[in-house]
Image (cartoon, rainbow, N blue to C red):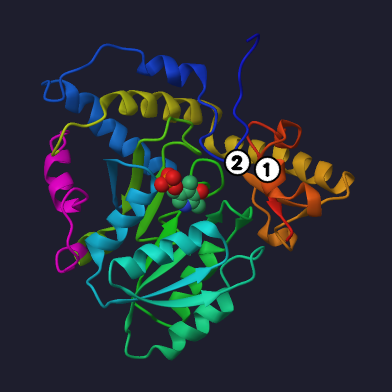
Amino acid sequence: MPGLRGLFIPGPTNVPDRVRRAMDIPMEDQRAPDLPQFTLPLLEDVKKVFKCKTGQAFLFPASGTGGWEAALTNTLSPGDKVLAARFGQFSHLWIDMCIRLGLEVDVVDAPWGEGVPVDVFAQRLTADRAHKIKAVLVTHNETATGVTSDAAGVRRALDDAQHPALLFADGVSSIASIDFRMEDWRVDIAVAGSQKGFMLPAGLAILCVSPKALAAAASAQSRRCYFDFADMARANKDGYFPYTPPTHMFRALRASIDLLNEEGLDHVFARHHRLAEGVRKAVQAWGLKLCASEPRWQSDTVSAIFLPGPMGSRSVSASPRWRAASSVSAIWAISMN
Ligand SMILES: *Cc1c(COP(=O)(O)O)cnc(C)c1O
C-alpha cells in the first residue's frame, strides 16, 4: 500500500514515527541498576503533562478502564456514595463500574450533547450536609459525544459547598491534548490512557494522584491487588515496579512526552483547537450538526456529528467515505435515530 496508513477513529490515535521507533529496541532488564535513571524522571515528567505538582504519577499496564478501577478501588469502600453525571458512553461505563464495585452512585442524567451539569452538582453537594458523598466523578472529555466539561466549575461547586469529597477526572481523551490543570483544579485523581493524547499504542493507564487521595487510600476498604497504589508507590520510590513493567511502553512514553515538550503544551492545545475549528466549519458547511449542543461544550479532540437517517452510524461504519477525518480531530459519526 503506498504512503502512510492513517487511522481515523477517536482512539487509538496515530502513533508518530519517533514514538514507534523508540519502542524498536531489544528487551531490557526490569531490575537493571540503571533503570531508575530512566523511570524516575519519566514519572516526574508525566506529572508535568497533567500539571500536577504535589501528587504522584502511576503507570499501570492497562487501558483507561483499568485507570478508572485503580481510582475507585484505592480510595473508596463498598457502600460509599459517589456523585456522577451520565451524558455519553464513557461516563455511562464509569458509573456502571462504580455499581459493579459496590458503590452507591448518585447519577445525574444530562442530555447527550451536554457536559457535567455543574449547577445540579452544586445543589447536590450543598444539600449533602452529612458529607455522605465521598467522591465526585467528572468525565472531562466525553469521547462518545465530543463534549468537554467544566472541571474547574465542579471544583468551585465543591469549594462553595465546603464539601470534602474527592474529585476524580477522566481525562483519557483530553489530557495532553486539551488544557488540563490537576493542581489548579485540585483534582484528586486524573486518569489518562496511552492510546489517545499520548499517541502510544493502548496498554498504559496513566494516573496522577493527589496527597489527599493517597491518604484516603490508607483507609479505603475496597479489594484491590494488581492496581494497589501502595505496592506501586513502594517500588516506584526507587524507580522500580512491583511486577514486570511494560518497559517498551515506557520508552515510547518518553518519546511522546519529549515530542509534547518540544512543541510546548500550549502550542499542542492551540493546534488541536485550530484543527477542531476547521472540522467544525466543515461540518457546518456540509449542513450537518454537531452532537455538542452549544459551543461551550465543543471538544477540541473529538467532533461527534449527527448523520441523517439512512447514513446513521450503523450503515456508516461500512462506508469508508464517511470515516474521513483529520488525524488529530476525529469525526465520530453517531446516528440520530
Ligand atoms: C477511551 C476512553 C476511556 C478508556 O477506554 P479504554 O478502552 O479502556 O482505554 C475512558 N474514558 C474516555 C473518555 C475515553 O475516551
Q: Residue at x 67, y 60 (%)?
A: 297
Whole-percent x, y for residue 51 in the image: 42, 47
Image quarter of residue 78: bottom left
Question: What's the magenta bit mostly, secondary-structure-wise?
Answer: loop
* Residue type of the residue flagged with mark 2: Phe
Q: Residue at x 76, y 32 (%)?
A: 321
Q: Which residue lies under the disc numbered 1?
A: 273
In reply to whether residue 100 is colored magenta, the answer given is no
Residue 144 seen in the current view: yes
Image quarter of residue 251: top left
User: Is 280 drawn above or below residue 251 in the view shown?
Assistant: below
* Residue type of the residue flagged with mark 1: His
Ligand 1 within 8 Å of disc 1? The answer is: no
Cβ atoms under marks 1 and 2 closer than 8 Å: yes
Whole-percent x, y for residue 290 in the image: 75, 54
71 on left or right of 159: left
Q: Quadrant of the C terminus?
A: bottom right
C-alpha distance separating marks 1 and 2: 6 Å
Q: Quadrant of the N terminus?
A: top right
In the rendered structure, which segment of residues is drawn in magenta? 217-241
| Label 2: element kind | helix
Image quarter of residue 328: top right
Q: Which residue lies under the disc numbered 2?
A: 269
* Circle number at residue 198: none
In the foreground, 11 or 251: 11
Q: Residue at x 32, y 42 (%)?
A: 62
| Label 1: element kind | helix
Whole-percent x, y for residue 39 in the image: 24, 30
